[in-house]
Image: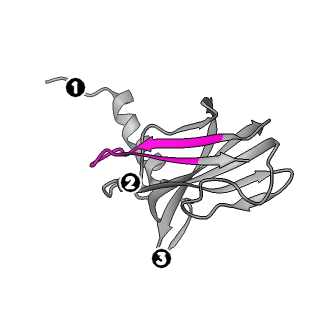
């Protein structure tokens, strides 16, 4: 039998400290159940996007624009695109704390993410977001929004 060296044993308390500050990860990860665009912001206006909307309605967005996507459940392949071009997005974890959903701050259970994508809208086009669930049923969900 091999003896554990001091370096490998030293990692155990360090990992415990790191994991102690995180949200509860021991629960089974919730499957991906919803993805949708909920806000589009540009210099001209900010629109709250209703469920099942297929297009922005309030104004014509041009120039730097932020698109916010809500994801309920956990996925492992997030992809944002505008007119087919891949976008980089920033994500914020959302935790369930009691009956309230809020940005994770070390309490609660991770339930999904908010993604914000920065794009430059020169003309009307299609924003698409998709992700695949990390566990059963391993479905892929997609949302499309025509940005006018």
Spatial CA span between label 3 and label 2: 18 Å
Mark 2 or mark 3, which is nearer the start of the sequence?
Answer: 2
* Residue labelled with disc 3: 99
Relative depth, front residue between 23 and 1: 23
Q: Is residue 143 visible?
A: yes
Badge number at residue 103: none
Residue neighbourhood size for the residue with mark 1, other residues' Cα within 10 Å, grouped as few (<14), some (14–19), many (≥20):
few
Left or right relative to 60: residue 81: left
Decide if residue 142 is on the left or right side of residue 42.
left
The residue at which mark 2 appears reads as: 25
Q: Tell me residue 108's x, y (percent).
A: 46, 65
In the orientation shown, which residue stands out farthest toward the right? 44
Q: Is residue 143 magenta?
A: yes
The residue that appears at 39% across and 52% down in the rendered structure is: 32
Q: Residue at x 46, y 75 (%)?
A: 98
The residue under label 1 is 3
Q: Main secondary structure of the magenta part?
A: strand
- Report the mark closest to the observer, 3 or 1: 3
Quadrant containing the N terminus is: top left
> Circle 3 — which element?
loop
Q: Earlier in the sequence, mark 2 or mark 1?
A: 1
Q: Against 141, is 79 above or below?
A: above
Image height of 140 relative to 20, above or below:
above
Percent across and percent down for residue 11 are 40, 36
Mark closer to the observer (2, 1) = 2
The magenta region covers 126-144
Mark 3 → mark 1, Cα distance in angstroms: 48 Å
């Amino acid at each position: 039998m091999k003896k554990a060296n001091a370096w490998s044993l030293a990692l155990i308390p360090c990992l415990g400290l790191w994991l102690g500050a995180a949200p509860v990860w021991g629960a089974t990860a919730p499957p991906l159940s919803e993805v949708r665009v909920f806000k589009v912001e540009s210099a001209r206006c900010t629109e709250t996007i209703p469920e099942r909307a297929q297009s922005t309605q309030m104004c014509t967005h041009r120039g730097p624009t932020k698109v916010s996507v809500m994801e309920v459940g956990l996925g492992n392949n997030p992809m944002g695109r505008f007119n087919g071009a891949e976008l980089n997005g920033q994500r914020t974890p959302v935790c369930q704390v009691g009956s309230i959903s809020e940005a994770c701050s070390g309490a609660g259970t991770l339930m999904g993410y908010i993604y914000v994508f920065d794009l430059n809208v020169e003309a009307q086009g299609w924003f698409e977001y998709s992700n695949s669930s990390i566990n059963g049923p391993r479905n892929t969900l997609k949302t499309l929004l025509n940005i006018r």
